[in-house]
Image: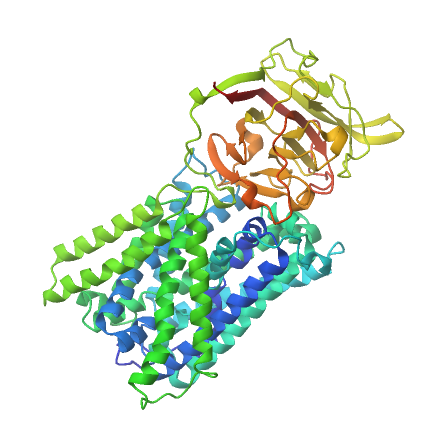
Amino acid sequence: MTTDDGLRRVIGFGGGLAVIVGTTIGSGVFRKPTTLARDVGDPATILGLWVAFGLVSLCGALALAELSSMLPRTGGVYVYLRAAYGDAAAFVFGWLYLLVTTPATNGALATFFGELILGLARVPAGPASPWRVPAVAGLTVLVLTAVNLLGARMGSAVQTVFTLIKVGALLVLMVVSFTLPEGSFGHLAPLPGGPRALGVGAASVIWAYDGWISVSMIAGEVVAAERLMRRIIIAGMLAIALLYVGANVGYFFAMPVGEMARQAAGVPQTIMAARFGTRGAVLISLAILCSVVGALNGNVLTRPRVPYALARDGLAFPFLGRAHPRWATPYVSILIQSAATVVLVALLRDFDRLTTYFVVVEWSALLFAVAAVIVLRHRRPDAPRPYRTPGYPWVPLVFLAGTLAGLVAIVWGEIDRASPNYSPLWGLLLAGAGFPVFAIWRRSLRPSPAAAGLVVAGSLGLLLAGCGPARPPSGAPSAPAPSTSPAEWTLAWSDEFEGPAGASVDPGRWVAEVGGHGWGNNELEYYTDRTRNAYLDGGGSLVIEALRERFEGQGVVREYTSARLKTQGRFEQAYGRFEARIKIPRGQGMWPAFWLLGTDIPTVGWPRCGEIDVMENIGREPAAVHGSMHGPGYSGGSSVTGTYALLGGEAFADAFHDFAVEWEPAIVRFFVDGRLYETRTPADLRPGQVWVFDHPFFVILNVAVGGDWPGAPDATTAFPQTMLVDYVRVYRRAG
């Protein structure tokens, strides 16, 4: 059956449920746990955010179910806004969907898909091959565009398949999480001092829940929409909330929050690897790929219906309202939105700012959409409503209050960063700019192509301005961030490791620590002072070599040896720039590090002395390094941690990289290859925790084997393993 909108009612309950579940569950529940653990830090608060915004989203869905039964037309939120507020508000929502929010969210999903699939295939896609991720992302968008051009029935069938895969993956992941022998519900206990960065946490959770409005956009293609839409929305939201909360309880049962914060490779991959090894990590990665494709397919299926409805109502170019004569799909809108997505993927390869940008703009529109329930109850009290929102008006009011609080927290949290992110404000500015554009549009009965070009150019200009310089959440590489000028630093100490091959390190600069009692981490190596484990290569580099060999000393027997060198008693300094150029080893169980330790450790102990980890890597995460700070109340797995990750299959063991911190009173900045990726201040600590980074520290270089964090080497780990250090340099402020 073809509707008045020119589209066919072919989607039933199962297809509609697949659209809402499949579009909402995308990357967020798999990708955001590490971000939340790192930035919020408190398990109880993180679970509270998932529950709270699940409730908020459910309230919004219950409210919009009334509107979908009252106005069962293709276009969803656009239709509701027009009915409640008139053409101007509907136009603004429609043009944002056409030119900004849809290309942004689809581009982010497609880019993440490209990074994942190239990483699984071990195809390098870093700075040396910058076109590979955009190429895969663009091709993915084009393939899904072709699928959805062939009809809503085809699109919803594909969506059903991907939805079953991702729901199955989440259920398997939950079962595995709750059956790990090291799991404990004690990991869910609130931490002393409470949470950090609630705005960042709110943005992550809202991003994960976004997509629940998608099914309202295809209401005109749902069979018996007046009856089925409310069932689809309510059942879908309950399923999503239960899956999200269940998955996150499982994550925290499986590992402490501090351990979760370090999982650059992904919390789901780590959990599956703990049970099934590398094969398990690969399988869950493939399921996540399906999840991302499912979310992207859902967007390609549903979102073009908004500009289509806009044109059908005379608020956009008529060609946007064309339905294909054979497939009965809004093919022009699908093609234009997909083309805009491909262009954005090519122009903007880092969508981190756009994620927040998208959330603020879209959920601001949802505030007005849910408020439309209240507005239309007053304006059109006698209109047929096959379904009425239960608990009215409290249910829509809960959504309005919760969403408004979340958006304020997000915007404030982004502005309050050490490097402020103003992209949410740019998004709101772009939304507001739609009103004068609409006024100009309505002055002409036949808008010209030149006017359309002006609108597109202006929106893209604001979009690009809103993105600004990319910042690297979770350590994604970015352009080098400006640190302090080199002229502001004076070299205080260095070792360039010049000397004949096989020579030992300079004893005037370094002390070799000796022992094999686990070093507080259950490590498996014995550190020696032999030149077999630490020596110069004759080419200007230090070699720290980990060997698989039986070694006995100090009453213990170990199966591995390595070296740990420190400058304690030779060189110690408070504040400055500490940097080293290092090529790390590779392999499961390897744990190379470049770090600083407080000189007062003999008297106050660890962690009261303070520790700054300039660089740590664990072998199972070849593309990630961690920068951490330890002190009283925030040590070990609860340290203040940042992560920097390479993209596209590259590994830190493939080449030398520069690692540095700039340490000043009340601030520490972390760099990789000149790129600032993390800034820490006393504000990052919880109440009652003490900033102990105000006295001299010494430098340590080591390669550990095994331990609580990296785990033991396995059959894939080849020995010997070496860490090469080109230089270590320490600067102090000039003057």
Q: Nearer the viewer, residue 588 or 386?
A: 386
Measured from the top left, where is residue 395 in percent x and y? 46, 78
Quadrant of residue 20 in the image? bottom left
573 to 253, vertically: above or below = above
Q: Classify residue 151 as left or right of residue 292.
A: left
Give the residue at x 62% y 36%.
617
Measured from the top left, where is residue 78 in percent x and y? 30, 71
Measured from the top left, where is residue 619 in percent x and y? 64, 38
410 to 10, vertically: above or below = above
Q: List the single residue furthest toward the right.
A: 555
Residue 667 visible in rendering: yes
Residue 168 visible in rendering: no
Give the residue at x 45% y 37%.
126
Measured from the top left, where is residue 564 in percent x and y? 71, 25
Q: Nearer the viewer, residue 561 or 701?
A: 701
Q: Classify residue 166 as left or right of residue 718.
A: left
715 to 202, vertically: above or below = above
Q: List the single residue furthest toward the top.
A: 500
Give the residue at x 47% y 73%.
398
